[in-house]
């Protein structure tokens, strides 16, 4: 038997995105966002309310980066989600983050987080809070790459958000092969 929960924003896994921007003075800013994902081949979409300083920065500069939060930086990633840059303008530095300017968009990369999407703003709807970015580049630190030069999930250790228990979980073990295991049912 199933239990019904009604209409709620529950899906698994929910990635933990750390959105980084520059403000009007060129100061790096970051926020934690869990409601987002890939929406086209070169597009990421997120639900971000207009009150966030980070959203104001995106609208002003037209660019942002999306880093994957990882197990090694849970406290830092959570901090940028519970403190507003509207109240703590230097929260990026207080989190212990260091920025490197993206070569592709007018936004910072977070040195401590090894994988990021570098994005240009495509659209933002204040009513629905839907922000859409065009992915211009994906970059990853060499220490999270496998011997073939591809991103290795086991080395990246990205975390997901559990909205039911307000917890973070690291993505775990491999249990199958995409586009292969189902062929045995053909």
Image: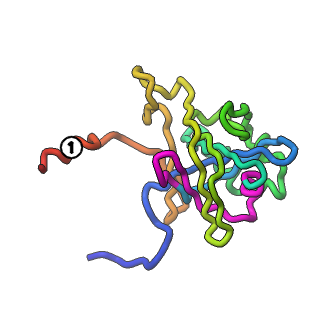
Left/right of residue 32 with respect to residue 40 in the rendered view:
right
Residue drawn at (56%, 50%), measured in percent from left and top? 16
Where disc 1 sits, the SS reads helix
Residue 33: name its quadrant.
bottom right
Q: Position of residue 82 (x, y in %)?
A: 70, 57
Left/right of residue 72 with respect to residue 181 in the rendered view:
right
User: Which residue is the site of mark 1?
Assistant: 181
Q: Position of residue 64 (x, y in %)?
A: 68, 46
| Colour scheme shown | rainbow
Left/right of residue 2 with respect to residue 132 in the rendered view:
left
Residue drawn at (44%, 54%), measured in percent from left and top? 13
12 and 134: which is toward the camera: 134
Q: Which quadrant holds the N terminus?
A: bottom left
Total count of labels: 1
Residue drawn at (44%, 36%), measured in percent from left and top? 153
Above or below, 142 relative to 178 = above
Q: Position of residue 39 (x, y in %)?
A: 48, 54
Residue drawn at (40%, 22%), measured in percent from left and top? 148
Q: Residue furthest right?
A: 25
Q: Residue furthest top?
A: 147
Stretch in magenta: 37-58
Q: Residue furthest front?
A: 122
Above or below, 24 relative to 163 = above
143 is within the stretch colored magenta: no
């Amino acid at each position: 038997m199933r239990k019904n929960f009604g209409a709620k924003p529950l899906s698994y896994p929910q990635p933990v995105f750390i959105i980084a921007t520059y403000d009007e003075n060129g100061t790096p800013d970051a926020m934690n966002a869990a409601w987002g994902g890939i929406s086209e081949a070169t597009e990421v979409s997120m639900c971000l309310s207009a009150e966030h300083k980070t959203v104001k920065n995106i609208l002003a500069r037209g660019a942002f980066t999306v880093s994957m939060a990882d197990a090694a930086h849970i406290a830092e990633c959570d901090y940028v989600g519970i403190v507003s840059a509207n109240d703590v303008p230097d929260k990026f530095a207080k989190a212990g983050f260091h920025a490197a300017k993206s070569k592709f968009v007018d936004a910072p990369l977070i040195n401590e987080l090894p994988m990021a999407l570098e994005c240009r703003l495509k659209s933002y709807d204040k009513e629905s809070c839907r922000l859409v970015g065009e992915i211009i580049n994906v970059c990853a630190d060499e220490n999270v790459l496998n011997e073939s030069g591809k991103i290795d999930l086991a080395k990246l250790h990205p975390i997901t958000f559990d909205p039911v228990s307000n917890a973070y979980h690291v993505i775990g073990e491999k249990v199958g092969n995409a586009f292969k295991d189902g062929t045995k049912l053909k």
